Image (tube, rainbow, N blue to C red):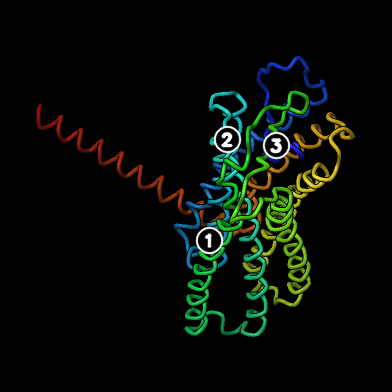
Amino acid sequence: MSYDENDSLSISILNGTTNATNPTQAVLIAFQIGRTISCLCIVGGILGNITLIFTISRSSFLYFPYGLLLLFISTFDIIRLISTIIYYLLQGNIIPLTLSTLTIYVTLYRYPKNVTNWLKVFLAIERFIAVKYWIKNRYNIHSNHAKTLNRLRQRKLLLIILILLLCSLISQHPNLIPYRFISTRIDPLRLLIVNKPNPNFYYANHLFNGILFTIISYIILDDLLPIIILIICNTCLLYQIRRLPTITSKKLADSIYILFFLTIFSIFIIPRSFLVVFNLYTNPEYINDTIISVVFHSFQGLEMINSAITGYTCFLSCRALRKDLIRNLQIIFHRNNNVLKSSIIELKTVSQERS
């Protein structure tokens, strides 16, 4: 993540600089820990989310709003993890660090994170509506009217997701303007990228306020507001689930547990938001570079868990998803065996004819 020179909080970089000042041992250790956790999350998270997408797309979950939301969440989590790959390519100077490449990274990082957080809010609201509907219509859940209503809800959900994508793009579009910064450089003490804001950058005939944009967009809209709503919705859902019948609520209870665990790991993204606020309103002369860097790099790795855990949380919490995964793997394995057997038979036939 990159911020203005005032807040000095951004991408962790570990490469050579012309500055004679070097980071402390504590900063290097925290950076290595954050990088190790991030790399594990990249590999495991992409694998888990792809498996979840594969399972949902080949099961009945695809035709329910709940499964559709999980499909979009896992997709944007993959994009978020891919942005971390770009992050480390910038660190190794494989991709040159310029305002253009920084803009690409920041966009791929912040846009999926904003979309994913609000998709989880929609998932919580959808589960709350499902609980209410289940309580009132527990004996008509498989009726034709219920199926028709479910299809209508899915269509409305697709429209809402489209609106969310457009709104997120609008809220994040200043990140697509690289010229609001003059330059970007590496802070050798914190191993962070520091952007020098353009004091003459105007947006819609008004002087652009980078601090106000960071507070509204990054802190409130991206992290704080959706997570607070998630916590409130989870509290209400855990209370409502006690009223559900034991037998008929099994699948619904599993989905609520998935949402509960996703909310827990989403909390990991909040500390970095407060670090931004801290840097925005604190004089850099009074900031301990070692402390701020250690905290940032540590939560850098922990935040990756939020994007990497989605697939595994769904499979561990939902028995139906595990069954669908096993069934699809068996179908693929059985199909490959049939293809292999047919190829062997054809080879034997050809060899016999030649003989």
Q: Position of residue 242 (x, y in %)?
A: 76, 73
Residue at mark 2 to residue at mark 3: CA–CA distance = 13 Å
Q: Position of residue 224 (x, y in %)?
A: 75, 57
Q: Which residue is mark 2?
A: 99
Q: Which residue sits furthest right? A: 286
Q: Is residue 301 visible?
A: no
Give the number of the disc on residue 10.
3
What residue is rendered at 65% in x and 40% in y? 198
Is the residue marked by circle 3 packed among few (<14), some (14-19), or many (20+) residues within 10 Å?
Answer: many
Q: Tell me the CA gap for discs 2 and 1.
A: 24 Å
Q: Going from the N terminus, do you reach mark 2 or mark 3 first?
A: 3
Disc 1 packing (10 Å; few <14; some 14–19; many ≥20) = few
Dot 1 amino acid type: Leu
Q: Nearer the viewer, residue 32 or 71?
A: 32
Q: CA distance from mark 3 to mark 1?
A: 26 Å
Res 47 → quadrant: top right
**Three-letter code for the amino acid on which mark 2 is drawn:** Leu
Q: Which residue is mark 1?
A: 166
| SS assignment at label 2 | helix
Horizontal arrangement in the rendering, residue 272 relative to residue 60 (left or right): right
Q: Secondary structure beneath disc 3? A: loop
Above or below 208: residue 189: above
Tally the numbered discs. 3
Residue at horizontal 51%, vertical 64%? 162
Left or right relative to 336: residue 239: right
x 79%, y 32%: residue: 293
**Residue shown at the point (87%, 34%) measured from the top left:** 287
State which tag comes first along the sequence, 3 or 1: 3
Q: Earlier in the sequence, mark 2 or mark 1?
A: 2
